[in-house]
Amino acid sequence: MTLLLHTADWQIGRTYTRFAPEDSAALAEARIATVERLAERAAERRADAVLVAGDVFDAQAISPRTLRRLFNALAPYAGPWVMIPGNHDAALAEGVWAQARRLALLPPNLHLRLQPGIVELPALKLAVLAAPLTQRHTYDDATAWFDAAATPAGWLRVGLAHGAVQGLLPQDVDATNPIAPDRAARAHLDYLALGDWHGCKRIDARCWYAGTPEPERFKDNDPGHLLWVRLEAPGDVPQVEAEAIARHRWYERALALAVPSDVDAAIAQLDACGAGDVLALTLAGRVDLAAHQRLQRALQAAQARLRALVVDETDLRLAPTAEDIAALRADGYLGAVIAELRDAAPAQQRQAQDALALLAALLAEQRETAAAEARA
């Protein structure tokens, strides 16, 4: 029995501009840490080889330090790594792979194919038909040559490619880098290891996408796995097992707030999130001043606890009640300002609401400070 670890789409060097700098740096670091964990799992389960189906890097311009750290992360697994470029790190003449070679970073157990060809692993009686991408976009099937490729008799025959299986992925998938949906059958492959689709996905019994091992976007397509592929003998149907490996979980939530129980539910959802979670939260509706203050406190606590939190409150409206205004206990000039903010014209309503919320928070803080001083 031969045990393979199939992975893809590491996207090392990816940046996260929508997050705060410290969160962006931590999310980028997690991608390398997950690769190290992949290597550890391959060593722990004594995998016979690791197949990496492209997009090791997210771009062609990667710093030497990041390159070194990535290849250092492979060290826990001393067996063969078989790796190809994808569309983000295509094998260009002066691209990221040329830089890695110039820096002499490629370990001796890495079988890197920058041109189409077969990687033979005689100790395993395994032939890997590799279809690297040599440019970002192609319109011909880079795996077509698999059908006629000769491999030693009695050996396992495995394909390794990066692209979009035609007709079986969602319609928004880029039509470039096409792969025939029946390639595994036509090429008599025991298994076809694919990259490009970032979720774990079965195409057929012999063809799978591993997906990215560390999520990097708010897309519910089952990312965050590696695949274990067991091959008993040539011609046998492989046994494929997905294992969760991601460090962070990404969630996208949209909540409509209208009554106090909606705010309670929103706060409960925030409280349920863990330290490794990345959350994009959209809030809409209307809340009174007291509910808004409770919600802001919960958001601030979650901001400190979660790995990353982005909040869109564009469509959340502050609708203070008469009781809210009375509770501020403001008179004179300050009372007049509050009344003006409350009754702002529609064109200035968003800014007025933000100002009223800030003013209410400052007044509440002053009252809390005065109460604390009185107790002291």
Image: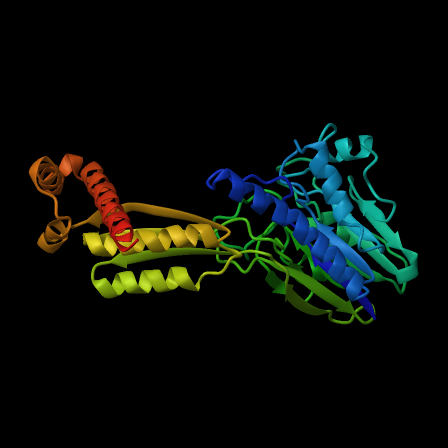
Nearer to us in this view, 20 or 159 = 20
Residue 9 x, y percent position in the rendering:
64, 49
Residue under the point 67% across and 51% down: 33
User: Quarter-wise, where is residue 183 in the image?
Assistant: bottom right
Viewer-proximal residue among 29 and 204: 29
In the rendering, at what x and y percent does residue 316 appear? 25, 49
Horizontally, residue 212 falls left or right of residue 16, namely: right
Identity of the residue furthest to the top in this view:
94
Residue plotted at (75% across, 54% down): 51
| Number of marks drawn | 0
Residue 243, quarter of picture = bottom right
Residue located at (75% from left, 35% from top): 97
Can you name the residue that lies furthest to the front here? 376
Residue 234 % position (x, y): 82, 68
Q: In this image, 37 relative to 356: left or right?
A: right
Instruction: Looking at this view, name the residue that lies furthest to the right.
Output: 123
Tell me which residue sits at (55%, 57%) in the image: 168
Is any part of residue 287 visible from this angle? no
Q: Position of residue 31 (x, y in %)?
A: 63, 48
Classify 205 as above or below 6. below
Q: Quadrant for residue 266, please give it.
A: bottom left
Look at the image and tell me whether residue 206 can be seen: yes
Check the picture and name the quadrant holding the N terminus: bottom right
Is 119 or 281 nearer to us in this picture? 281
Colour theme: rainbow
